[in-house]
Image (cartoon, rainbow, N blue to C red):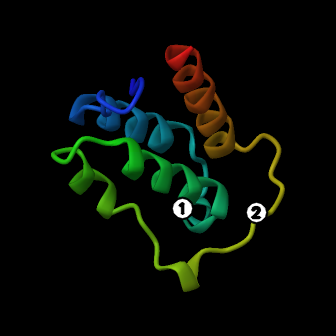
Amino acid sequence: MAGGNSKRLTKEEVEALLERLKEEEPREECWHCECLQGFIAQLELDAADDAKPLLSKYKVAPRKIRACSGCEPCPPANIFAEYLMRKRERKA
């Protein structure tokens, strides 16, 4: 997990997070949701250079991103929130 500015997400960490998204995401249309795309954007910011290409196939053009439908539960939002909490804990 990234902690501070010097440690970036490794390729293995990005792969694990993407695998979790694939396992927990029930519907194809969710890949265009702002919840999931926000998480992908954050991972891209936090990823090491060699891990960034893994994310490119999951990115959606901005014009194709749709608003959150309010799904409950929302696996991408839950995974994103957990990721941000772990990231913040490691910086503390």
Q: Are marks 2 and 1 in contact (CB under 8 Å)?
A: no
Quadrant into which the N terminus falls? top left
**Residue drawn at (67%, 74%) of the image:** 66
Residue 62: x %, y % from top left: 53, 79
Label 1 secondary element: helix
Residue 30: x %, y % from top left: 61, 60
Work out whether 58 lies above or below 16: below
**Residue drawn at (30%, 37%) of the image:** 15
Label 2 secondary element: loop
Mark 1, Cα crowd under 10 Å, few <14 / some 14-19 / many 20+, is many
Mark 1 or mark 2, which is nearer the start of the sequence? 1
Residue 29: x %, y % from top left: 60, 66
Using the image, tell me which numbered label, if any, was put on residue 68. Answer: 2
Considering every residue shown, the one lying at the far left of the view is: 50
Residue 40: x %, y % from top left: 47, 53
Give how far apart the Cα atoms at labels 2 and 1 are: 11 Å
Work out whether 8 lies above or below 51: above
Q: Amino acid at mark 1?
A: Trp
The residue wearing badge 1 is 31
Task: Tell whether 40 sits left or right of 14.
Answer: right
Using the image, tell me which numbered label, if any, was put on residue 84. Answer: none
Work out whether 55 lies above or below 50: below
**Residue drawn at (46%, 44%) of the image:** 22
Quadrant into which the C terminus falls? top right
Q: Amino acid at mark 2?
A: Cys
**Residue drawn at (57%, 46%) of the image:** 25
